[in-house]
Amino acid sequence: MCGIAGILKCNGQPPQEETLKQMTGAMNHRGPNHESVWLDSQIGLGFRRLSVIDLRDGNQPMTNEDRSLWIVFNGEIYNYKTLRDQLKLKGHHFQTQSDTEVIVHLYEEYGKDCVHHLRGMFSFAIWDVKEQTLFAARDHFGIKPFYYYKDENHLLFASEIKSILAVRGVPRKLQYQSLFSYLTFQYVPQPDTMFEHIHKLGPAERVLVNSEGEMKIEKYWEPHFHPVKRSLADYAEEIQWKLKESVNLHLQSDVNRGCFLSSGIDSTAIAAMMKAEESTKTFSIGFEGVNNETIIANQTAAKLGTDHYFHILSTEDFFESIPKTVWHLDEPVADPSAIALYHLNQLAKDHVTVVLSGEGADELFGGYRIYREPDALRPISWMPNFIKDSLRKSLSIYPYHFYGKNYLLRGLTPLEERFFGNANIFNKSGKMNLLHESVHAQNSFLHPTDIVKPFYDKTVHLDPTTRMQFIDMNFWLPGDILSKADKLSMAHSLELRVPFLDKEVFETASKIPVSNRIGKNTTKLALRKAMEGIVPDAIVNRPKLGFPVPIRDWLKTPISDIMFEQIRYSGIEEIFNMNIIEEMFIQHRSNKGDYSRRIWLIYIFSVWYTLFMKEDLKQLRVPCCNGGEIV
């Protein structure tokens, strides 16, 4: 697990070592064990290393025998030992025991199709000295990040945006389309970032760049679902076997390991399977009150027999860490659980260097409660589309609220227009009111329906629930879940691994019919069946709750005043209508509506804007328990 960076010059000028070291220096938290750079006539590669496998000989940039290929690689390849043996039989010679060198020889053997042989999480770049080309790729699910910036003089790439921003001349300019998307998705969907001209590779994308800087990006894999009718018991048995194999592969490391443990089935399944193989440390975090997840996690740890550590997060700790969390995320991600995740990673790093986690299970096996919505809307799904359209238009302009109105509106709205992923914060009219007229006048925006349409077009043959999962795997999973998992573990120089997001595990999940994913009163039906006898019974049948952060309650206390002050003085009054924002605070405090998600989204953007766009603003107004502020 590392940080990678690179400069490809397209104007005949050689890259500067000082610039490359500025890029690697901006993300030293990703690799505190070693730093190195390599330069050639027009290319420079930089690397920060967190030593996990082959501690002695695994430093990068790494090359092959004749020094014709040079690589920087971030991630872990879990089938690298098998691949190395296969490559040896083909005549390849290895100098190290690292998974990095395996990728180099795979590229020698298969070229750009090397990615099809990899089982793991990765982003890497390979410079071919003979061909004078740069090849880069990102893993199948988008676990590891890859950002890039291109102008007429050079291409820059890195594991983090702040590394690219460290290069003199790279503009810090807000991308308004990204802001428009963020207001709905609560993150910025790929390929955009919140910075104009800085982009990110999407999951399962690879790119080839020639010496003139011409880029060709292509998708090499997609998470297609193709249900096959089999018994629930058969699927449960296959899930159990495939997940055990994945967990065992994810235990490969030359450093100490642990596992996150919440009150849900996903992390508990990983912890139980890990504990069956070795003595295991587990970690959990929670808030004081009725939704304290650590209570159940502590009970589960006792039943599993793990060495358990937990932390109760205070309101003061939560808010004081917001600037650090937002800085490490590079872009605003308006998920309140990100702040708690920052502290959970901090707790784990005190004891281990590698931690396993349960991300991805919900997207693969149908874990979100929203996936049950198509079944709930079935009573009105039979209507012809022209009747639905007519009724929806009438209801939309009907000024009064009545019980069942929202249900009818969602049921009358096509799936492609109502589901953009697990977050849908502001609708079109809400964004029109929130943003200044000048912003609308100067920009022509793509709406969420335009962004998700190409992905819906690929799934017209599937049931609505499976189509929703496909959208989440391409948007919510890489944009929110995996983005914060990578950045906030690396913030503490901790490697986070996600055994559910394995090609072989997905292959099994992709075959499960929706009837074996979504039950009458439950989700992840097949996964729960597979975990019977492995996970404590109380966890097997426990409904998904998410991570309960009490933002709604905090916004009814004096904390909300300081949050509003942060928004007011962040400089975003040039973008947003402050009267609309102030009215949200008033309505929420008066119990006239729940505006917590919308307020939090704006608040996080204001913190990000202050940190990344308004360097002249030295003080962030962040609430503390005593009503004060921190710098």
Image: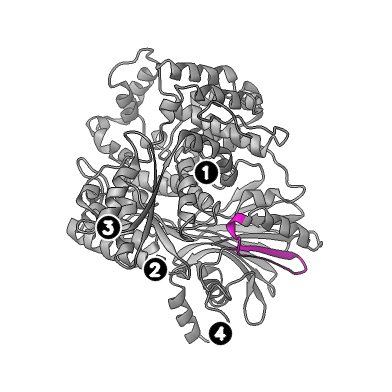
Task: From the image, state whether disc 3 or disc 1 is nearer to you.
Answer: 3
In magenta segment, residue 46: yes
Q: Nearer the viewer, residue 45 or 366?
A: 45
Pointer 3 or 4: first along the chain: 4
Residue 187 image point, x, y percent: 51, 40
Secondary structure state at the residue bearing disc 1? loop
| Residue 95 placement: quadrant | bottom right
From the image, tell me which residue sits under label 1. 189
Residue 463 in sight: no
Hey, which residue is sitting farthest right in the picture?
Answer: 13
Range covered by the magenta-colored residues: 29-49
Which mark is on residue 249?
2
Locate residue 224: give its quadrant. bottom left
Q: Residue at x 30, y 56 (%)?
A: 269
Helix, strand or loop at disc 4?
loop
In the depicted structure, whether residue 519 falls above or below residue 271: above
| Distance (Cα) linking label 3 and label 1 | 38 Å
Distance, label 3 to label 2, CA atoms, is 21 Å
Camera-near label (3 vs 2) is: 3
Residue that badge 4 annotates: 93
**Percent of width and height locating residue 28:** 63, 56
**Residue in the picture at 48% in, 55% down:** 350
Majority secondary structure in the magenta region: strand
Q: Earlier in the sequence, mark 3 or mark 1?
A: 1
Question: Which label sits on residue 304?
Answer: 3
Q: Earlier in the sequence, mark 2 or mark 1?
A: 1
The crowding category of the residue bearing disc 2, from other C-alpha atoms within 10 Å (few below 14, some 14 to 19, many at least 20), is some
Q: Residue at x 54, y 77 (%)?
A: 109
Q: Secondary structure at mark 2?
A: helix
- Say what amino acid the circle numbered 2 marks: Leu
